[in-house]
Amino acid sequence: MVEAFAVASGKGGTGKTTATLALGMALAEEHDVTVVDTDTGMANLLFHAGLSDVETTLHDLLVGDADVPVAAATYERHGLRVVPCGTSLAGFEAADPERLREVVATLAADTDVLLLDSPAALGSKSAVLPIVLADRTIAVLQPTIPALSDGLKVQEYARSYGTGSAGVVFNRVRERSRVDAVADRTREYFDGPILGQVPESTAADDARAAGEPLLAYAPDSPAATAFRAAADELTVDDGDSGAVADRFRSAVVPERP
């Protein structure tokens, strides 16, 4: 079985990468999980996962004339398989986003859950592609009306490509009254449920500075506890790995978002 989730936000600063790794580690208690940093232009998952010194990344798999096996850019960390993306401008310019289809298809053949840490903005082919490839999206939002609007743009793109919604995670929550008001709007306009509400946390900032995922650095913190609760609310559908891989390989790459 396998299901691919695009973890998306519509804008930066929501804690999307922290959320991706936290959900991944929580889901890994019951599933075989692979996390891929598909933000080829502004990657940072490698810093969160302690992989800043690795030699081979997703960029190397996306170069048109490269013959690098996917396994060479896949690392076992914190109970997960992690495929980080590089941060160099040269790597970004050389990467062919269409090759991401084959990479994801290869990974889909050997995992239960794929989490695609997606680009924050939706203004290019490479940014929209993870949403096209995913079965469902997980929107990571701060509890504000502008953030909700950004999340609705993600949902609009997802709907247009036939990608479903797994739900919303409110992250970096500071005021209960504010999140309650935004939650009412969310239930009205979003397809999926509210999976969880994660409080603002200095532990999350400290974990990033230490180069560790939150659930490894501060597993008993309120934020880590909230992410585990959100993962518990997330259903994982059974999908035939071969069929899903074939779908990824044949996915239509959008010319314009």
Image (tube, rainbow, N blue to C red):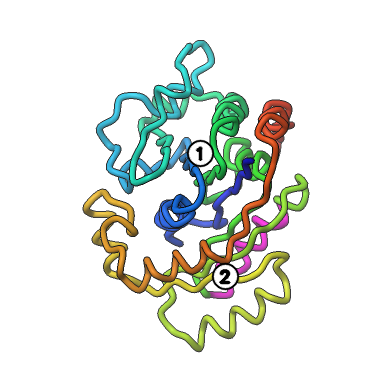
From what the image shows, is residue 94 above or below residue 226? above
Three-letter amino acid code at the position of disc 2: Pro
Q: Quadrant of residue 130?
A: top right
The residue drawn where x is 55% and y is 32% is 110
Residue identified by numbered label 2: 146
The residue drawn where x is 60% and y is 69% is 148
From what the image shows, is residue 116 above or below residue 23? above
- Which residues make up the magenta segment? 144-157
Query: In which quadrant will I find the N terminus?
Result: top right
Q: Residues within 10 Å of mark 2 (few under 14, many from 20)?
A: few
Secondary structure that dominates the magenta span: helix
Q: Secondary structure at mark 1?
A: loop
Looking at the image, the residue that sits furthest to the bottom is: 177
Of labels 1 and 2, earlier in sequence is 1
Give the left or right position of residue 155, taking residue 36 as reference: right
Q: Which residue is at the front of the view, 78 or 163?
A: 78
Q: Secondary structure at mark 2?
A: helix
Residue identified by numbered label 1: 38
Q: Which residue is at the front of the view, 177 or 256?
A: 177
Q: Quadrant of residue 81?
A: top left
155 inside magenta stretch = yes
Give the left or right position of residue 200, taking residue 177 as reference: left
What is the x, y in percent for residue 146? 57, 70
